[in-house]
Amino acid sequence: MSYLKQKMLTDSVVVNENVVKVDSFLNHQLDPVVLKEISKEFVEYFKEKEITKIMTIEASGIAPAILVASEFDVPMLFAKKAEPSTMKNDDQYSTDVHSFTKNTTSRVLVSTKYLSPDDKVLIIDDFLANGEAALGLMDLVEQAGGETVGIGICVEKSFQPGRQKLEDKGVDVFSIARIASLANNEISFVEEE
Amino acid sequence: MSYLKQKMLTDSVVVNENVVKVDSFLNHQLDPVVLKEISKEFVEYFKEKEITKIMTIEASGIAPAILVASEFDVPMLFAKKAEPSTMKNDDQYSTDVHSFTKNTTSRVLVSTKYLSPDDKVLIIDDFLANGEAALGLMDLVEQAGGETVGIGICVEKSFQPGRQKLEDKGVDVFSIARIASLANNEISFVEEE
């Protein structure tokens, strides 16, 4: 069993059937050992993909993304959440990302300078639930004419539709911890093949 | 000359007397080699400080902070910018950080679970200008009864008052690239002793 899954069984808090908190080691306080083990797994899985760039969205994706970028020795690019007052700018690719949790839609953007048609992008994020953040990042890569060659996720809520939406786009999704259910205040992982 | 300073001379863009853009390698697209060299310098400078925790603020401080945390093998904690609707919560330390650039004040917070009176905290951030973000982080550490034992900054605008404000608090500030001036579209660094 991966180190992240072990850590989730001992150190995460199941809040309800839909929410598990991992903020003691993954997305508020970060355990560097957990992060290093996560990045090793991503590198092992995606190493044949000839990746030219790692991409994520601020803020929780940045730590795993920079560690993976270090291993692949390619640049990492993080999409920024636009200030409410930010106007559409010719120098930026932008897209809207809906959050079902917060019931808000926010614009995220990257500079056009840092994505090109030659890019083979690996998207990294901490959570996959409804897939909106990853779809938004894929849209930014598409706007630049580049290719998303994979999506690496730390924690996937497999009982929500995110993975299916991404696979429908034909992209390879690899998640380290796939949660089948959070019922009865317990984490059940999807059984590994 | 440090790798970051060399990179700034070749790859940054001086926008005006007060603004230099480093978003091709430090705070939007990130060059993993630059980040690794930065983290090595922080580790070398602060290695005797018996640090128990690395702390930063989302989003641009996260990448250097996780690399330094990996080297010291201590947890990294990043302060979150509160949603406008977030109420004061007994489980959080919070403080207000003013941005002179944006002329806005935003509340940042950390969970009380992740700071304790035993903590010796090293604060890491990408930029130091007016010092408001670092002062805010120091305030959070103080609220927990912990101690800020150092502040590591990637790029310091030494012609702005941030360093003085932090030194007035008695804390050791180490900046890798100290900019003396951005006049005439040129970066002049503070001369090293």
Image (cartoon, coloured by chain):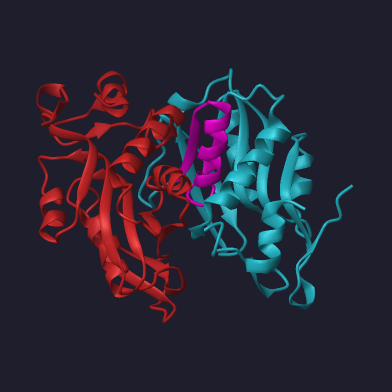
Chain colours: A red, B cyan
In the image, the segment drawn in magenta is B54-80
Q: Which percent across, then down, holds residue B78? A: 48, 39
Task: Between residue B106 and residue A160, name the one nearer to us.
Answer: A160
Residue at left 38%, top 78%?
Answer: A88
**A162, above or below A17, in the image:** below
Q: Is residue B46 above or below residue A80?
A: above
Residue A104 occupies quadrant: bottom left
Horizontally, residue B43 falls left or right of residue A188, namely right
Q: Is residue B129 visible?
A: no
Q: Position of residue A124 (x, y in %)?
A: 33, 49
Observer-nearest residue: A30 or A100? A30
**Residue B47 seen anywhere in this rendered image of the structure:** yes
Queried whether the magenta region covers residue B67, the answer comes back as yes
Tell which of B60 and B82 is nearer to you: B60
Q: Residue at x 63, y 46 (%)?
A: B37
Residue pictured at 38% horizontal, 42% vertical: B87
> Where does residue A163 sit, x and y in percent of width and height?
15, 49
Residue A88, compared with residue B101, is above or below; it is below
**Picture quadrant where residue A126 is located:** top left
Where residue B15 sits, quadrant-wise, is bottom right
A184 in the magenta segment? no
Q: Is A44 positioned to the left or the right of A174 in the image?
A: right
How many numbered discs, if any? Answer: 0
Q: Residue furthest right?
A: B193
Q: From this view, report whether residue B125 is shown above or below residue A36.
A: below
Q: Residue lying at the far front in this picture: please name it.
A: A48
Q: Residue furthest bottom?
A: A90
The image position of residue A45, as x and y in percent, is 28, 42
